[in-house]
Each structure stands twice: as structure tokens, then as C-alpha cells.
Image (spheres, rainbow, N blue to C red):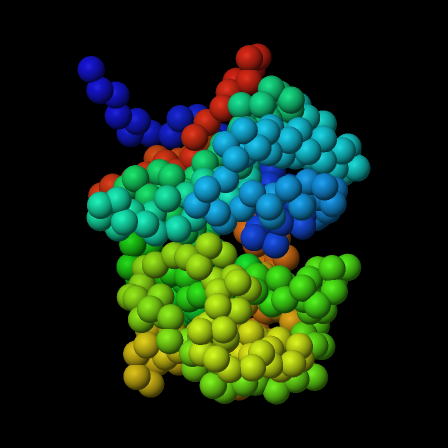
Amino acid sequence: MSFFFTKPLYEPKPDAGILGAGVQSGTSQDGLDICLCRFEYNTESPLKPAMTLLEGTTVPFPDKLSHRLRHSSFKKNADLEEILLLGRELAEFTSESLLEKLSDWYVSREELGFIASHGQTLYHNRVEHPHPVVCTYQATDADLLCELTGSVVVSDFRTRHIASGGEGAPLAPLYDYAYYHHSSKTRVMLNIGGISNISIIRPGSALHEVTYGDTGPGNKIMDQFAQYIDSRRHYDEKGTIAASGKTDEHLLELLLDNPYFKRALPKSTGPELFNLDWVMRVIEKSGMEQPSNPNLMATLAELTASSIADCLMIQLKKGEEAEIIVSGGGTRNNHLMMQLKEKIKQPVKSLDEVGGSSQFKEAQLFAYLGYCTLFTEGLPVFAPEKNIRLGKISLPSEDPKPGVF
């Protein structure tokens, strides 16, 4: 016998608020983003609950954990035992960090309705098996996190997206459409994390009509090169190294010749493809001399900006005006932002300028997906008549229903 859920797993109360925590770590792998959001049920549009970011913080990973994550990430062959232990350690770190922050914010664990945990991506790549398929894995022991916090935990959002025919990434368009769909103008929601991704949302469009995908490199290669230059440095702060150099046009042309840039959207990628080793291999294969540190950093910044601009040039219709709204760590790279504005030639602003949070957008995304998994009929991701619940649910032993107040 088959059972089909045709209504929310938990009935939201229109007069009640729900507190949800979104926790996630990006490809920088230097810390855990935690956001606390209040959701209020929207009777007219259940997929667009009133969502308020109450608190947000980033808790740095201990150096040992950060090092182990980087050592085990984005590899075809990794130690299975180490990966399983990392999932457990991340759950313990997440629990400890979240409960500590809730205390700082004067929120008891009983008041918390649910936790949406993305975990840490260790692998995300398209492989031939025997046909192209996306493989993804996010380290997070959601059941342990559930036990340690006593809260409902929603996790593992990407695998259901892939199982339903998607790429598993980016998932940001689901959140972008709900909260930044404009009635009269095209908006491009651009997130520059370790990898860059876009959502192109046109007036009057439905969710499944949003154009989206990973454009290619974001900050990850620049971060890796900054660490290569000086192990005490995590990234090129404000883009100062890049700003002191000059783009090597020949190397830039070789890098942009990667077949990924010619693939049509939707598509996804990760540091498995775009990493510093790839850059060094291109330099070595070409026989050219490695550029100076400032010039190579400038070239890497231009690679990110050019790949984004080239993708938008293809996707935006001739003469179509769009508002480009940028989030992620890339917004703090002044040199990169300047390049983007020069290349895109469309209005470019940060998410903070339109009332959002550039720093905590992705944590909010997963809080939103957690809410939709529990309190809606699912999201019409690929077609208006097909709703999908993306998250898996871990229930605590006692009082398994998400709390409301």
C-alpha cells in the first residue's frame, strides 16, 4: 500500500509563530553559519510564510576540524571511516554551538520549533555511471543532532532534488523566488560563495520557470591561493592582493576554455572541478611562466567575474534590463565587486541594500526549506502539479512535533 502526503505533515496555526534554526557550512569550510528565524503562516500563499531573521552568527571551526574537513573534501577517494567520524563531530559541534547561541539569545530549546541542517558538502560532482549523474554528499549526522538537541531536525536537502531530476544545486532559487520575485522587473539573484550561482526571476514567472545554475568559480580558488601565499591568511581581504596585480589575459583565456562554461543551465559544479590544482595544471600544460602572486590573484578574480558576466550575457534576452542582487562572501571583495559592475553593465547591489542578509542568506535558505518540508505540501520545483519535500526528518524520542508559540 502506498501513502501519498497531500497536506502538510504538521498543520501550521495561522495565529502562531514558529522558530526555526538554519545551520550550514559553505565551501570555505572555516565556520558554521547559524541563523534563528521566525516563521508566520501565510494563509494566501503558504509557500511564502512571513520570515524574519532574528539572529545570525558564524562560529569558527577549530583549526583541527577545519583542516580535517579540507583534507577529506572534494576527492573521488576518501577515507570512509574519517567521513563518518566527521559527520558525528560536525553534529556535536553544531549542537554545542547552537545551544550556546540560543542561550545567548535568550531562547530555550523548548521554544525552538525545528533545526534545518545542511551540513558540510564533502563531494558534489557530475560523473558518468554509465550516463551523467550528479553525486553529492553532505556530512551531517542529523539523527545525532536530533538526540543532542531534542529538536526535530530536517536535513539532506540535495539528494531528493537529484532523485527528482535536478542537479542538487543550487537550491537558492527556491528561496529567491519566494522572497525576491518582483512584479515588474527581472531580478538576478547572484550568490558568490566558494562557487557562484544565479537565479534569474522574471515578472510573472512560476517557480519552475526560474533560470538557475552554478556559473563556475566563486571565492574558493582565490581563498586557496591566498592560503598558498600565506598559510595564516584565509582569503584575500577586500581583494587587496588582486587589486595590486594585473590580469594575465592569456591565462584567463585558457581557464575560460573549460568545457563547463559551455554547458547550458541548469548545471552545478564544485571545488572538485574548480580548484587551485586545476589552475596550476593549466599553467603547466601551457608551458607559460607562472604569473606573480598579485597578477595570478588578479586573474583569478577576473575569472570569477568574467564567467558570471558571460553566463548572464547568454541568459538575459537582448535589451533585457535586470537588477543584479549579490550575496555571499564575494560581496566583501571590493575588487571583485568593481569588476562585476564594469562587466555586467546592469544595476548591481548587495542583498543588504534590498533588506536581506548577504552573510546569512544560505542559512536562511535551509531554514526556509526546513519549514516547507514540515509545514507545507512541498515545493513545485520542476512542475506546477508536482510538489516535492526536499528534506529528510529526524524526530526526537519525546514530543516529536515542532513547537509553536
Q: Can residue 110 be seen from the camera position used here?
A: yes
Determine the residue positioned at 56% across, 43% down.
Answer: 72
Q: Is residue 166 left or right of residue 185?
A: left
Total numbered badges shown on the rendered structure: 0
Residue 92 rendering spot, x and y as whole percentages: 66, 29
Percent coordinates x, y for residue 352 in the rendering: 62, 64
Q: In the image, is 382 to the left or to the right of 276?
A: left
Q: Residue at x 38, y 47 (%)?
A: 168
In front here: 172 or 255?
A: 255
Q: Is residue 325 above or below residue 244?
A: above
Q: Is residue 102 visible?
A: no
Q: Quadrant of residue 236?
A: bottom right
At horizontal 63% and vertical 57% (from top left) the residue drawn is 359
Which quadrant holds the C terminus? top right
**Relative image position of residue 18 (x, y in whole percent):** 57, 34
Q: Is residue 266 above or below residue 37?
A: below
Please name the residue shown 51% across and 20% down the image.
Answer: 395
- Left or right: residue 62 compared with residue 198: right
Residue lying furthest front in this view? 287
Q: Is residue 100 above or below residue 259?
A: above
Where on the picture, by quarter, is residue 208? bottom left
Side (left or right) of 93 relative to 25: right
Residue 381: image location, x then y, percent: 32, 48
The one of 362 and 166 positioned closer to us in this rendering: 166
- The quadrant in which residue 318 appears is bottom left
Q: Residue furthest right?
A: 104
